[in-house]
Amino acid sequence: MNIIVLDRDGVINHDSENYIKSVEEFIPIDHSISAIVRLCEAGFKVVVATNQSGLARNYFDDDHLSEMHDLLCTIVEKAGGVIDGIFYCPHHPDEGCSCRKPETGLLQQIEKEFACKLQGCYFVGDSLQDIEAARAFDCNPILVRTGKGLITEQLLKELNDFSVPTDDDLSAAVSRILGYAVC
């Protein structure tokens, strides 16, 4: 089974330091939806793994988060693709949960839900937490420069870590993936 894991904010939709709190603030990044459709057409199951501490901070509630995820799924479906699953951590960073990236609890949930192994699969993200979670679970990380990606790219350079492929956006990352052998 070909599964790809995508972070949400900063990869699929525009991110904000003030959090994405409603469907009005949920704005897809150019070409991200068509990139997801291309993955679907190539036979990938597309899953989202996202930290959503705005829930714990009371910036939005479960209903608002569901509305945002329903919107994402609807937009992708209208374009001809499908989001096979959305997994999120609702906890505050100080709670010490096992599901907040860079921890791997979300990836474990994905494996359980789909009865599969994610090792060797692609994980596209824009943050160091995404990269660390992917590495800890033996996934293949790809960094995108959208969202927090430019800051993360600079941090990786400062750490002399040039091992993470980096692309301008999800569309470019998907082009890279579709040019590679599938996991």
Image (cartoon, helix red, strand yellow):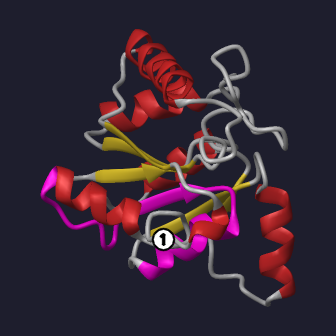
Q: Horizontally, is 44 left or right of 13 in the view? A: left
* Secondary-structure class at tag 1: helix
Image quadrant where residue 11 sits? top right
Q: Nearer the viewer, residue 63 or 80?
A: 63
The x, y position of residue 12, in whole percent, is 60, 36
The amino acid beneath tag 1 is Ala
Q: Horizontally, is 113 left or right of 59 in the view? A: left
Residue ranking furthest to the top: 78
Residue topped by disc 1: 134
Residue found at x 37% / y 44%: 47
Decide: is 76 above or below 17: above
Residue ranking furthest to the bottom: 160
Image quadrant where residue 41 sits? top left
- The magenta region covers 114-136
Decide: is 108 above or below 79: below
Residue 85 colored in magenta in the image: no
Residue found at x 38% / y 66%: 105
Residue found at x 70% / y 26%: 30
The reply to whether residue 183 is visible in this rendering is no
The x, y position of residue 32, in whole percent, is 59, 31
Q: Nearer the viewer, residue 23 or 143?
A: 23
The reply to whether residue 177 is visible in this rendering is yes
Decide: is 120 above or below 75: below
The x, y position of residue 126, in whole percent, is 68, 56
- Rendered-image quadrant of the C terminus: bottom left
Residue 119 colored in magenta in the image: yes
Q: Horizontally, is 110 left or right of 51 in the view? A: left
Q: Nearer the viewer, residue 5 or 62?
A: 62
The x, y position of residue 180, in whole percent, is 41, 60
Residue ranking furthest to the left: 115
Residue found at x 46% / y 33%: 36
Q: Residues within 10 Å of mark 1 (few under 14, many from 20)?
A: many
